[in-house]
Image (tube, helix red, strand yellow):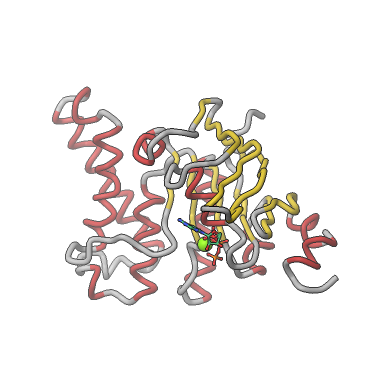
């Protein structure tokens, strides 16, 4: 199978600091790939480089065979690589539903619905968007909160709205930076369940940064382990669990 994303020899330097050094891996459609490593390992920098928010110092990034390196964040997003941020960017005065729809409208505009399709079709796409948004909010127990301004929701609920907004666009590749941080354990499980279903049923490629090792082991197909900017291990949860270097560098024992 052709990889969805190819990262080859990627390095990112910040005025002398090697945040990423020669990182190489492939990511596939339908796969949940976790990125783990200690604080400052370069996990967020990896997402920033893939999505165009920081320039790479060396190396190449290909999405469906096309180069991404050098493109602006908006152009990378339009190509279908969507991401969430470690801290959110919701519209506080807008309702949860409106926030999710705002995410979809970006897609509707860039997806040329409004221009190429007639108004009736654009409205139909919008209706479908509303249904999809409501269904996802319901799944996350946010149905009752859908009409409330986001600023009145709890931190955990806001986090879920932000992630639902990104999930609702169903892009080919999703980069989720710590998607379940701040959620209660039941909500965490439900979020991981939705993530797994988007990969399994919709064939979306998902990369997620996660610190809770149990969730990573049970919820991902493959794991990339970063330490001080270097990829020190890659493989299935079972392979990574048995990797000596990982045990020493990351889990602190061998
Ligand atoms: N824009 C930037 N400018 C300068 N240094 C940066 C920048 N972004 C990250 N760094 C540095 O690069 C290193 C990797 O940071 P990064 O945020 O990628 O780590 P991380 O693995 O996501 O950590 P955490 O688990 O704490 O989120 C750190 O030393 C950080 O201080
Ligand atoms: Mg980070």
The residue lying toward the viewer, choosing from 161 and 210, is 210
7 shown above or below 44: above
| In the displayed structure image, the side of residue 218 where residue 84 appears, left or right | left
Quadrant (top left/top right/bottom left/bottom right) for the N terminus: top right
20 shown above or below 119: below
The residue lying toward the viewer, choosing from 228 and 101, is 228
Q: Residue furthest top?
A: 116
67 shown above or below 240: above
Residue at horizontal 72%, vertical 67%?
250
The location of residue 238, given as percent across then percent down, is 79, 58
The location of residue 81, given as percent across then percent down, is 45, 40
Quadrant (top left/top right/bottom left/bottom right) for the C terminus: bottom right
The location of residue 111, given as percent across then percent down, is 30, 31
The location of residue 12, given as percent across then percent down, is 56, 47
233 shown above or below 252: above
Q: How many marks?
A: 0
Residue at horizontal 46%, vertical 73%?
183
Q: Residue furthest front?
A: 16
């Amino acid at each position: 199978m052709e990889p969805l994303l190819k990262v080859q020899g990627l390095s990112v330097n910040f005025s002398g600091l090697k945040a990423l050094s020669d990182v190489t891996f492939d990511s596939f459609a339908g796969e949940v790939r976790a990125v783990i490593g200690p604080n400052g390992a370069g996990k967020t920098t990896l997402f920033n480089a893939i999505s165009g928010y920081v320039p790479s110092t060396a190396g190449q990034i290909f999405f469906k065979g096309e180069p991404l390196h050098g493109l602006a964040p908006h152009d990378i997003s339009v190509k279908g690589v969507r991401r969430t941020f470690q801290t959110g960017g919701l519209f506080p005065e807008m309702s949860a539903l409106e926030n999710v729809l705002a995410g979809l409208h970006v897609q509707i505009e860039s997806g040329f619905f409004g221009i190429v399709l007639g108004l009736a079709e654009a409205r139909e796409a919008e209706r479908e968007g509303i249904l999809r948004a409501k269904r996802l909010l319901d799944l996350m127990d946010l149905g009752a909160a859908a009409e409330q301004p986001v600023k009145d929701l709890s931190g955990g609920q806001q986090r879920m709205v932000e992630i639902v907004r990104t999930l609702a666009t169903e892009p080919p590749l999703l980069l989720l930076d710590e998607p379940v941080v701040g959620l209660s354990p039941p909500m965490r499980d439900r979020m991981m369940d939705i993530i797994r279903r988007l990969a399994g049923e919709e064939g979306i490629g998902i990369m997620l940064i996660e610190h809770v090792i149990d969730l990573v082991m049970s919820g991902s197909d493959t794991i990339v382990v970063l330490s001080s900017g270097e990829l020190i291990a890659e493989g299935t949860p079972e392979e990574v669990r048995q990797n000596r270097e990982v045990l020493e560098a990351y889990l602190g024992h061998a």
